[in-house]
Image: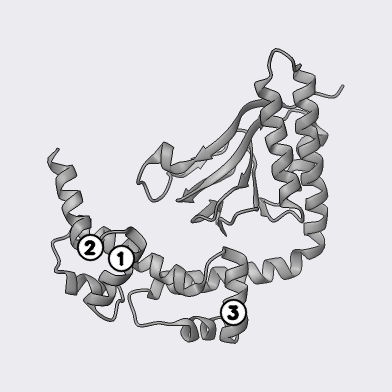
Amino acid sequence: MRIFPQIVNLGLYDAALVHGNVSSTKPRRVSVYEIEFITENGGFSYIGNQRFPIRKGCVICAKPGQLRHTDLPYKCIYIHAVIEDEELSALLHSVPDFYTPSAPDVFESALNGLISESKLTKYSSSIDIAIKFLEILSLMFKASQSSCRETPNLHKNMKIIQQAISFIDKNYTQSINLDDIAAHVHLSRIYFHKLFLDATGQTPHSYLLSKRISAVKFLLTATDKSFSDIATDCGFSSQSYMTYVFKREMSCTPMQYKKQLNNLSQT
C-alpha cells in the first residue's frame, strides 16, 4: 500500500525576517525532508561536513538525521514533508544534498503551483496537493539522474572552490589577491575566476571583501581598536580604502556604523 507524503510546512523563507542581523543559524538536526529552491544568492549552506555556496536557482534536499546550518543571507521557497513510503524515501535519499537543476524556472514554477494549490483549501483536496508534490519529486529524481552523470567534474570543481574558500577564510587578513588564490588551487587566474563565479555567483574578490567587511563589523562591535588598526587587522591596505569599501557595501561609514551600534545599546 502506497502512503502519500505529508507536507507539514511550505512557503517563502527570508532569513533576515526570521533571524534579523544574525550572520549564521545554529546547527540543528533535520527531522523531516527539507526541499528548498534558492531564490537569491547568499552565504553558505552546511550539511554534515559539506559546505555549499548558496546560489540562485539551486536546490537543497536535506534528509532526516542530517546536521545543517546556514551562513546568511538566505532566501528560498521551501517544502518540509514527512515521507513514510519506503520507495519514495529511498529515491529522495539518492538525490544530492545540493544541486542545480537544468531548468530551474520549471522547478520554481512547480513549487509556486504547489503553494497556490495549498492555499485553495476549500477547492483542493489533500490528493490534489499530494499530486502536485509528487510532480516536484519527479523533477528532482530526473535531475538527480542527470547530476549523477555529471558527478565527477562537479565534485572536482566543488572541491577546488572549497579549497579556495578555505584559503581565503584563513588568509583574508593578509595581502592576498586573485593570483595568490588561483595559485593555491593550481589554476590560471582567468579559469579560476570563471569557475568561482559560476559556482558561487560572486567573484573571488567580492568574497574576499565580504570576509574583510564582516571582520570589520565584528571589531567595530567587540573592540575599541582604532580604525587604522582595524583596517590593518582585516587585510585592507589603508584606512581610507577600508572606509571606501565599507561605505559602498553598507551604505554608511565605519564611524556611522559604530555610532548606530552605540545608539542601539543605549536604547
Disc 3 or 1, which lies upstream in sequence?
3
Q: Residue at x 34, y 79 (%)?
A: 174
Label 2 or label 3, whichever lies nearer to me, is 2
Mark 1 to mark 2 CA distance (whole Å): 7 Å
Residue 131 left/right relative to 173? right
Indicate left or right for 249 with 57 as reference: left
- Look at the picture and state if 221 lies above or below 26: below
Point out the tag, 1 or 2, that comes first from the N-terminus.
Answer: 1
Q: Give the Cα separation between the discs numbered 2 and 3.
A: 32 Å
Badge 2 element: helix
Direction from residue 187 to residue 28 in the image, left or right? left
Quarter of the rendering occupied by the N terminus = top right
Q: Which type of secondary structure does the marked residue at label 3 adopt?
A: helix
* x then y, percent, for residue 14: 49, 41
Which picture quadrant has residue 5? top right
Tell me the distance, in whole angstroms, between the alpha carbons under discs 3 and 1.
26 Å
In this rendering, the answer to whether 231 lies above or below 127 is below
The residue wearing badge 2 is 254
Q: Residue under circle 1?
A: 246
Q: Are marks 2 and 3 in contact (CB under 8 Å)?
A: no
The label on residue 58 is none
View extreme (top): residue: 122
Q: Which mark is residue 192?
A: 3
In the image, residue 231 sits, relative to residue 10, either above or below, namely below
Visible in this render: residue 71?
yes
- Say whether marks 3 and 1 touch (CB < 8 Å): no
Looking at numbered disc 2 in the image, what kind of residue is underneath it?
Answer: Pro
Could you tell me which quadrant the C terminus lies in? top left
Look at 68% across and 24% down and name the residue there. 118
Picture coordinates of residue 160, whole percent (x, y): 60, 73
